[in-house]
Image (tube, rainbow, N blue to C red):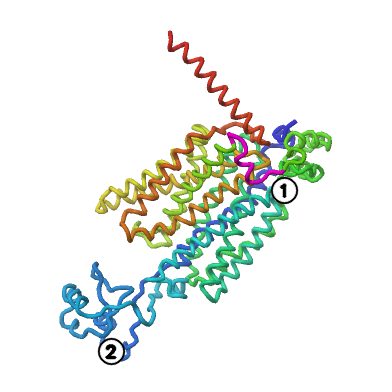
Amino acid sequence: MNFEDLLQEVGGFGKFQVLTLLLLCFPRLLLPLHFLLHNFLAAIPPHHCDITYVDRLANLTKEEAWLISIPRDAEDVFSSCKMFSEPQFHLLVNSTQEASNTTMNITAVQNCQHGWIYDQSQFTSTIATQWDLVCEQRGLNQATATFFFIGVMFGAVIFGYLSDRFGRKSMLLVAYVGTLLFGMLSAISVTYSMLAVTRTLTGVAMSGLSLIVLPLGLEWVDIHHRTFSGVTTSIFWSLGNMLLALIAYFVRDWRWLLFAVTLPCFVGIASLWWLSESARWLLTKGKLEQAHKHLQRCAKMNGRKESGAKINLEILNKTAANIAQKPGGNYSYTSLFQTPMMRRISYCMGAVWFGVAFSYYGMSMNITGFGLDMYMTQFVFGIIEIPAKIIMYIVVNWAGRRHCQAWTLILAGLSIGANIVIPKSLETLRSVVAIIGKGLSEASFTTVFLYSSELYPTVLRQKGQGYCSFMGRLGGSVAPLIFLLDGLWKPLPQVTYFAVAVLCGSSVFFLPETLNVRLPETIEDTEKQSLEKEKQLRGNISEVMPLKSL
C-alpha cells in the first residue's frame, strides 16, 4: 500500500484538507506584503536641492527662488539633482528654456551640496528621504530590494534542507518567528547598513513561508485536487497584493509601514496550533506513531473514522518501507543531479524559475504608466492576477502543466517585447499589452509552484523546491538592478526581460508532463515514470509508422 492509497482511506479531500489549506493560505497572504514592499518602502518623492540661502530671498516667491537656484533639465522641469553655484538673478527677467541652457553652459552647475528638500504630500517618510538615497545614491535605494531577494535566495537553500530534515511545520514556525523578529528590527533601523542587513535576514525568514506552504498542502491532498490546492493558495498572494496597496495608502511612514506588514506574523504563529505535519514526510523519516496520529485526525475530520481505524502501525511500516530513504543513504542537494532525469528536471526547472521570477518582478516593480497613482496601480495589479489564476486552474487540467508553463512564460516575454516596438503615442494599446503580460506572468508563477512540486519525489521535494526557489530569487534579486541599464540604452531593460522570458520558457519543453500522475516518492520512482513515458511515446510512434507506410 502506498501513501496515495492511505490518503484515499482517510479522505483525499475533505474538511481536514480544507482546514489545512486555509491555514496555509495565511502565509501566502503575508508574502507580498514584504516581497513587493519596496514599491512603497523605497519610493522616491519629487525633490530638489536644499538651497541654504533661501532666507535671503524672502521677497521672492518659491517658484522664483527655484528659478534662480535650480537649472532645468531637457524636459524643461527643475532638476532634482543639480543646482547653480550662485543665484542667477537675471533669469527673473528671461526665464525661457533657451536662456536657462545658456546660463548652464557658462555658469558652474553642481550637484546638490546641502542635501535635498522632499515633497511630503504623498509620503511622510521613506528610506530614500531618510538617508537621501537619490541622485548619485539611487543605486543604493534600488539595491534594498536586491538585498531582500538575496536573503530569500539563500533562505530557500537553508529552509529546503531544514524542512526535509526537521519537518515542514517546525520550519514554518521558525520562518514566522524570524520574519517577526527581523521585520521589527528593520522598522527601528538607525542606519542604512542596519536596514540592509535586517531586510536581508527578513528575506531569509520569508523564504521559509514561501517554500513550505505549497508542498505541505500538496502532500495532504489527492491527485485530483492538487491543482485546486495550488491555485487556491496562490490566489491569496494576489489578495496580499491588494492588501499591501491598502496598508500603504493609510500608512505613509516607512517605519510604521514595516510594523504594519510584520505584526500579522503573530496570527500566523498562533494558527500553527491547528496545522498538522506532513504524514508523507513523517513516514519517510520512520516516525510511524506521529504519522498514525495525524492520519487518524484526518480520517475523523473527514468522517472516515472507520476506514481510518483499519490503518495500523504494521500497514504504515510497510508503506514507509516503500517511500523511506535507502538504509545508510543521505539525500543532499547533490542528489538533485544524481540521475539522468533528476539532472534534466533540475537544470530546466532552475532556468524556468529564474525566468519566471525575473520577468514577474521586472513588471511588478514598475508600477507606473497606467494613468493611476501607485496605490491604485498596485491594487489593480492584484486584481488582474486573480482571473489569470482562475483561468489557469481550468487550462492546466486540460492542456497539462508543461504546455501551460512554457507558453505563459513565452507569451509574457513576447508582451514585453511588443511594448518595445509599439509607439509610445499608442498609450491605450501599450497599457492593454502590459496588463495582458502581467496576467501571463502571474499565470506562469502560479503554474511553476505546482509543476516543480509534482516533478520532485517526496524524499527530495523540499530540497528541490529549495533549489528552484534559490534560482527564482536569484532572478528576483537581479530584476530590480536591470532598471539601471536604461542609462546605457533606454529599451535595454525591456529587451533583457523579453529575451530571458522567451529563452527560459522554451526550456520547459524538455520536461515531462505531471497531469494525473502519482507524486513520486523516491528518485527511483521519478526515473521509472520517465522510462514508462518514453516507452509509451515509442509505442505511439510505432503505431503511427505502419499507418504512414500504408
Residue 346 percent coordinates (x, y): 56, 41
Give SS at disc 1.
loop
Where residue 270 appears, x then y in whole percent? Answer: 69, 59
Q: Are marks 2 and 1 in contact (CB under 8 Å)?
A: no
SS under mark 2: helix
Which sits in the foreground, 238 or 210?
210
Q: Which residue has dot 2 on it?
A: 57
| Residue linked to disc 1 | 277
Give whichever of discs 2 and 1 has the lower sequence position.
2
Looking at the rendering, which quadrant does residue 87 occupy? bottom left
| In the rendered image, the vertical position of residue 12 relative to residue 481, given as above or below | above
Task: Identify the residue shown where x is 19% and y is 83%.
Answer: 92
Name the kind of residue labelled 1 in the image. Glu
Tell whether 243 sits left or right of 69.
right
Q: Which mark is residue 4?
A: none
Q: In the image shown, does 2 or 370 lie closer to the viewer? A: 2
- Graded by Cα atoms within 10 Å as few (under 14), some (14 to 19) or many (20 or more), the crowding at tag 2 reads few
Q: Which amino acid lies under the numbered mark 2 shown in the image of this protein?
A: Leu
- Residue 201, by quadrant, is bottom right
Q: Which residues are magenta?
A: 330-341
Image position of 362 (left or right of 63): right
Q: Quadrant of the N terminus?
A: top right
Q: Position of residue 20 (x, y in %)?
A: 67, 47
